[in-house]
Image: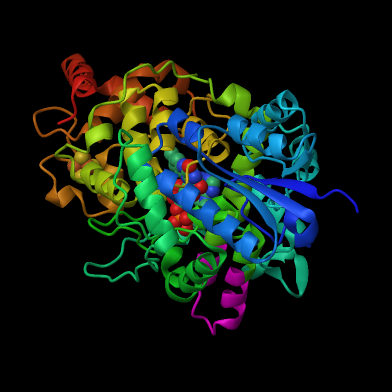
Amino acid sequence: MTAPRHVLVLGDQLTRAHGPLAGADPARTVVLTVESVGLVRATRARVQKAALFFGALRRFAADLEADGFTVDHHRLAPSFEAAIAAHLERWPGATLEVMRPNDRGVAEALRAAARAAGGDVRVVPNPLRLVDDEAFDAWAAGRKRWVMEDFYRFARARLGWLMDPDDPTRPEGGVWNLDAQNRRVPPRGHRFAPPPRFAPDAVQDEVLDDVARTLPDHPGRLRPFDWPITRAQALTALDRFVAERLPGFGPYEDALVHGERTLDHSQLSVPLNLGLLHPREVLEAVERAYREGDGRVPLQSAEGFGRQVLGWREYVAHVDRVRGPELERANALAHHAPLPDAYGTGATRMACFADAWANLDERGWSHHIQRLMVFGNLALGLGVDPIELTAWFTSLHVDAQDWVMVPNVMGMSQHADGGGMTTKPYVSGGAYLNRMGDHCRRCPFDPGSRIGPTACPFTVGYWDFVDRHQERFARHPRMAVAVKAWRAHDAAEQAAVRARTSELRERLP
Ligand SMILES: Cc1cc2nc3c(=O)[nH]c(=O)nc-3n(C[C@H](O)[C@H](O)[C@H](O)COP(=O)(O)OP(=O)(O)OC[C@H]3O[C@@H](n4cnc5c(N)ncnc54)[C@H](O)[C@@H]3O)c2cc1C
Ligand code: SF4
């Protein structure tokens, strides 16, 4: 009789349709799954994030066992190393197959742990990406800048996604990018369909109790816990998004609405990043809804959503793979201010910030514009250390993983790479937030003021950013106007902005 295969399934690769478990014979496959408390402690992850990973893994392991696999599931293990050592004590000399981990450095750490315990690790391809490494590297070779939009067009043509059926070299509708149509603010009283909520079953209830007991000192609240943690729930979340919120996704993609937790965003980053959904099936569902929906799904929504999944998501994964090691330490703008207390407590009178923070506090998630234009934008204006900000984002968001967080925070949001990922820093004053949302009218600050007691902290931070980096951006095609305007301000006003920024760094109002 031949020896069984040993497969190590990581918590963000929960799939039986792709990778080493695809077509695996249950009678000949031993599966190792690990709930690593050490990993959760290392990032001081919020409790809801720990419950998401542990719960999804526990359910995945239980389903495999029910289907006849031998499963070595380690509940609340102190670390991966300890679980691998225990596995190899039971099955001496085994080689563990593992799908190439999404995060850098993990494969090496797993291999070292297995070898120390007398076994080994064999890394097999990771089919959860839509654009493989060779294709990306060929596209990137010789390019001075890796512009996301160029990559997106390349990836879209390569996959044949949302292309003109009569001429597969042309994008559907003849235009690659319909972003200009996606900047609407919803009319007052507009109702958004809420995403489905999945009440915890008995297994998840136990996980929630385990996490409460094991991580009493970690931030966040555990309940309500209603994220999709099984394949069936992930499919329901996808179906409901496509049926109910995809039509509005495009137009309201950039909006900020007080008290609206999700707007028409999909919240699919959670099941996608757990491996419960493959990005290809998400794209296929979107294209099907566009083509078969009798006009219900406008092209701007299908294209806008696909650009996030096929464009941004794939792009940042490759940027992290290739440039991650330098990116995670980058600080081109020399920003060193500490993260203000309000990022930990949410205690502030700034209406847009308090609302975004409440969203994050409730379920460990905030939507893209809250991440980019509220949390990220304010930190950039105040000159917060981008590495500290990345750690904050990673600890508190349930969908955070290094491969996606590092490029998004360091590159996209904080310009810490000096502009490798974005043509212009994502920094703006209150006027932008006022245009895209309804928070300013319920806020004690004035988005148009940069000095005085009611000056909006975003506006103050914006001008201080322009001041600090005027030499760098004086000839920048999209920032030079702001530099010129700043230089035209009188010296007293400039000094007031600098003084106020220093105060804001000490304490946000
Ligand atoms: C500062 C900052 C931090 C971020 N941190 C994360 C993170 O830790 N994990 C994460 O998955 N995304 C992150 N993003 C990207 C994006 O904000 C989230 O993917 C999105 O808000 C998740 O909600 P959603 O599923 O409703 O997204 P939707 O708005 O519905 O978008 C659809 C999908 O597109 C993908 N997507 C969209 N934008 C991006 C992007 N910039 N990078 C990668 N994928 C993208 C996601 O998979 C998302 O589920 C971050 C963005 C910023 C600016
Ligand atoms: S005035 Fe400034 S702080 Fe207040 S809601 Fe508007 S942008 Fe936010």
Magenta range is 285-304
Res 217 visible: yes
Q: Quadrant of residue 309?
A: bottom right
Q: Is residue 138 above or below residue 197?
A: above
Q: Residue 129: give x, y in percent of width and height.
A: 69, 50
- In this rendered view, identify the residue nearer to me: 496 or 92: 92
Q: Quadrant of residue 218?
A: top left
Q: Is residue 352 above or below residue 179?
A: above
From the viewer's perspective, is 217 left or right of 506? Answer: right
Q: Is residue 42 above or below residue 196?
A: above
Q: Is residue 143 above or below residue 99?
A: above
- In this rendered view, identify the residue nearer to me: 464 or 365: 365
From the viewer's perspective, is 380 left or right of 8? Answer: left
- In this rendered view, identify the residue nearer to me: 246 or 141: 246
Q: Residue 55: give x, y in percent of width and height.
A: 47, 53
Res 24 visible: no
Indicate the quadrant of ligand 2 in the picture: top left
**Residue occupying image coordinates x 59% and y 41%:** 316
* Colour scheme of the rendered structure: rainbow
Which residue in the rendered view is the most extreme toward the bottom?
A: 294
Which residue in the rendered view is the most extreme toward the right?
A: 1
**Residue occupying image coordinates x 54% and y 25%:** 328
The quadrant of the rendering that contains the N terminus is: bottom right
Residue 302 drawn in magenta: yes
